[in-house]
Amino acid sequence: MKNKKFIWAVMLPSMLHMCIFIIAPIIIGLVISFFHYNPLSSDNYFVGLDNFTALLEDDEFLIALKNTFVFVFVTVFLNIVTALLIAQCISWFKSNKVRSLFRMIFFLPCIASQAATAVVFSRSIFPTTTGFLNVILNAVGLPSVNWLGDPKVVMISLIIYSIWMDVGYNIILFSAGIDGIPTYVYEAADLDGANEWVKFRKITWPLLGRSFQFVIVQTLISHFQMFTQFAVLILKDGPKNSGLVLSRYIYKTAFEYKDMGYASAISLVLFVIIMILSLIEQKRSQVDWEY
Amino acid sequence: MKKRIVSLLLCGIMVFSLAGCSGGSGGGSSDDVTLTMWTHQNEPWYDAYMRAIEGFEAEHEGVHIQIETFPYDEFEAKVQTSLIDGEGGADIYEMWGGWALDFTPYGTLMEIPEDFASQVMEETYAPTYGALVYEDKLYGIPMEFNIENGGMLVNLSLLDEAGLSVPTTWDELKETAIEGTVHNGDTFEVKGFDFVNWDSVPYTFFSMILSQGVDYMTEDGTAFNVTTEEAKKAFDELASMVTEDHVTDLEGLTGGGDLEGYQQLYAGRVMMCPRGPWTVSEGEQSFELELGKDFDYVAMPWYTDTPRFAAENGWSMSVSASADEKKQELALEFLKYIYQDDVMLDLNVSCTQIPAKKSLAQSEEYLEKMPYAEVLTGILDDGQFIGSFNTDRWKEAVNNTFVAYCSGDYASIDEAMEHLNTELNGILK
């Protein structure tokens, strides 16, 4: 009994925090999405499902939805593949210091200010005439690419930046997972004459199941919510809205169009998408073993 | 013993905490009043406001104004959320004119008393306060005339190198732009006339419609009408400078440049660029160029012989309606203080603004301090208030249609204008 009281006492602050700052806003957002809502006005009337039905005819919303899916699935896939490869390469170093050095180098972009790095990319790396990438392309005889001004290329630029900015976090998680695999498993494989590829495929890959589950879910969620690069790296959502995603459209609708009810409806759609994908992914990659 | 030490430590911490909570009035008497003022971050502007505040505080013993600044990109959202909340924001708000449209109908801003309001509306240009008026009542004082037409930057070195001179008519402007443009394959070495930026395309378009003697709104003023022959002609003319004359490209609207158009002018990559006079100081300070020698601020030729343009409100000052009565009274006093000619002149000059007050805009003292503004002060009477709608959405609609039309997404100018008209009228709903 005493133990239970202690548990409640310890958990109460975080539960209160969760109720006030997570659950309550979700409920309020849900309610607002059924209203024509301007917080400054006293005339906020119930519109039923109008905000949701309007979404189906809203071209900008449909573009944002498509762009969001393209961005999230391509970036998350490339992010995880890159992170896993780099983590595996880092694990081959015997020295702890060398491993830590590489992890630190790859993790540095994660702790830098996203707004600042996005400005650096938009003003120094991606510009068409003076950008670093085009200087390199021109040096090897290739033509310049309009990284931020061509609607067909804008999403590629955003994906390149996002992977650079976020891959370090997953490298740390995969490195921790790889380091946690007992060495005797690899030693047994060595005795059987397995090469590095076989060891990776038969040992590392399956035993990283738990790390995978966590990495996929948290990377999916964070990428659906990404905002800074869409607001800073590209100009006004990119040419022909080629860089418009749901998070940015929510902000635009709420604070530029001042339509909080409609913005809440879009938020709810995003919330449902993230929830369904997270549940599917958790169910799909459940692990029932331990070592 | 341990318990005693811990108790003493905790007491000490509590005393310090309580002392911290009471902070803010240290050194002043209990009758002192501190007003909070929110502005966007801009160093010369901050310095000018501080000078005004010092002068006001010297005349009003016991009244203090604490200034808090925010990056421009966050400022609108901060102002909006604080006015929604009604508490914890500022007593005095620096406000971009168009934002006031969202607040004036809901009683979040204090109404300016009738006598002072009449004085302000009589002494300032109509386009500077249109968005601050709701049901004939004024909810702030305008600081500047936000003019996006009539003036442009020219790179004198590039003009000289090309053997060209500053154009004085629309046809000359086009010819000079074409002759001054230097291509290097598909890219530009010099853009002759870089008018493609977020503000210039919509404002030039509307000015070209008005200059032809028609309006961009219907007669009763309740809807946009950009399907007139004059509107089509104006839009097509602007687009042809990109698609046929190739004097610039769409980079200013689509992104991809390392610098804005006017900055590229200072970097020697643009010959002419229409922008407000606020860009002059950047050329002098950041690019270390000399006005009159390396570059100049000159009159931009009008599309026809009749100069007409539309302008949205620029920066203004408003008082929060949720401030208590005493603070509202003092905040109003501050507004009256900065509205005085000498204080406003210092603000306008320091912030390189065109004054909202007619007497200041036409004064010799102002033109002595900002001689390059003369090309604009002579045309202020030709401007009209753009209208009570969200100008961010208006710019977005015009610019998106412009990019799409130049990219060949519309079969004809008629189709483009029909689409734009629908988009614009969607803003009014």
Image (cartoon, coloured by chain):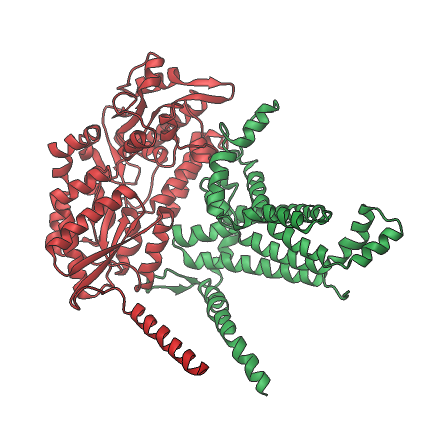
Which quarter of the rendered picture does the C terminus of chain A lie within?
Answer: bottom right
> Compared to B400, does B283 lie above or below?
above
Side of A150 relative to B23 (left or right): right
Question: As rendered, which of B110 and A233 lies closer to the eye?
Answer: A233
User: To which quarter of the image does residue B164 belong?
Assistant: top left
Looking at the rendered image, the quarter that the N terminus of chain A falls into is bottom right
Q: Residue furthest front?
A: B1
Residue B11 in view: yes
Vertical placement of residue A274 versus B387, above or below: below
Residue at image position (25%, 48%) is B131
Q: What residue is shown at x 36% (from left), y 26% (from top)? A: B265
Badge count: 0
Q: Is residue B125 visible?
A: no
Name the residue at the top extreme.
Answer: B163
In percent of width and height, residue A34 lies at: 46, 64
- Provide residue A79's location: percent of width, then percent of height: 64, 47
The chain displayed green equals: A
State left or right for residue A175 relative to residue B139.
right
Would residue B135 be found to the left or right of residue B9 on screen?
left
Query: What color does chain B have in the rendering?
Result: red
* Residue at the outermost bottom position: A1
- Depth order, front residue of B51/A77: B51
